[in-house]
Amino acid sequence: MLSHHQIRVIYEEGVESVTQTIRQLSEMSEVEDERLQRIIASTTTAQLKKIEELTARITQLEAELLNRLRQLHRQQLTIAELNRHIAQLQDQVKGLNKQLTEAREQTRIAREAHLATVMKNSQTSSLPPSTDTHKRTRSLRERSGRKPGGQVGHRGMTREIIEQPDHLIIHAPETCRLCGSSLIECVVEESERRQVHDFPQPKIEVVEHQVQTKVCGRCGMKNKAKLPAGVASPVQ
């Protein structure tokens, strides 16, 4: 920008100097305007690009947020359905537990009634002796004067338990005698051993011989096995 002194000097030099100065100032103004326009255009382009990037990012975030909201809504619906299903199962379990308790009580009452009926006889109730299930019988043997059991001096012949029996049969209780509960998964607390020694009855042992025929996979020849010596008839 020109100072007051420079303007006065140019004015004193004449019209031509003033015109030239005005032309120079105009050219400088045009150059400065172009420079400002380029700066504004560059700044505007960068700002517009930045705005577009931010707009795209906002749109993407809004889409992600909407997707998350939908997923959350579905999860909430799934949780609600699971809660309803769990509540229904809990009600069913309560009903089954109630039925199980009633069944156990009925089993206990029936078992006690059965035991009371079995144990009732003419001595423990007003029933006549003819209704007794187990009646005592009198032995027809004459008294020998000896004490019952093994006699003095008699050598015992008690068999000993062997460690490797030919057959083993497990007798396990299946249900509780008191409440009727299953005993399949319960731990065995004690196991008593009883062995029965006996001679096996003679029986015919049957041995079956099966003669196989095979076809060769290479040539197709049928090959039949041979029977051992002494085996000829279908049954002998």
Image (cartoon, rainbow, N blue to C red):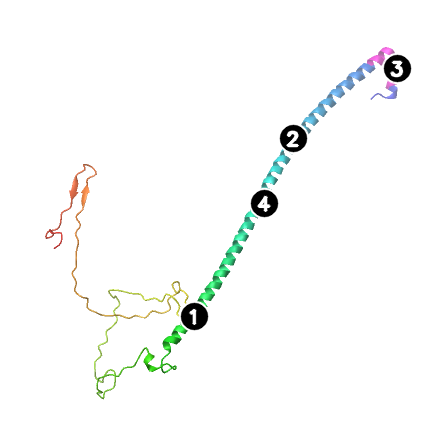
| Circle 3: element type | helix
Q: Main secondary structure of the magenta part?
A: helix
Residue 186 is situated, as x and y percent measured from the top left of the image, at 40, 65
| Circle 1: element type | helix
Residue depth check, mark 3 versus mark 4: number of the one nearer the observer: 4
Asked if the residues shown at circle 3 and circle 4 are in contact, with their CB atoms under 8 angstroms apart, the answer is no
Q: Magenta stretch: give its range.
A: 6-20
Quote the CA–CA distance across marks 4 and 2: 31 Å
| Circle 2: element type | helix
Residue tagged 3: 11
Q: Is residue 95 left or right of residue 49?
A: left
> Reading the chain from its start, which is encountered first: label 1 or label 3?
3
Query: Which residue type carries mark 3?
Result: Tyr
Residue tagged 4: 73
Residue 171 is situated, as x and y percent measured from the top left of the image, at 32, 66
> Reading the chain from its start, which is encountered first: label 2 or label 1?
2
Q: Residues within 10 Å of mark 2 (few under 14, many from 20)?
A: few
> What's the mark number on residue 180?
none
Query: Which residue type carries mark 2?
Result: Glu
> What's the mark number on residue 52?
2
Pick whichever, 91 or 65, lies toward us. Answer: 91
| Circle 4: element type | helix
Looking at the image, which residue is at 47% across and 63% down? 99
Q: Looking at the rendering, in which quadrant would you find the N terminus?
A: top right
The reply to whether the magenta stretch includes residue 34 is no
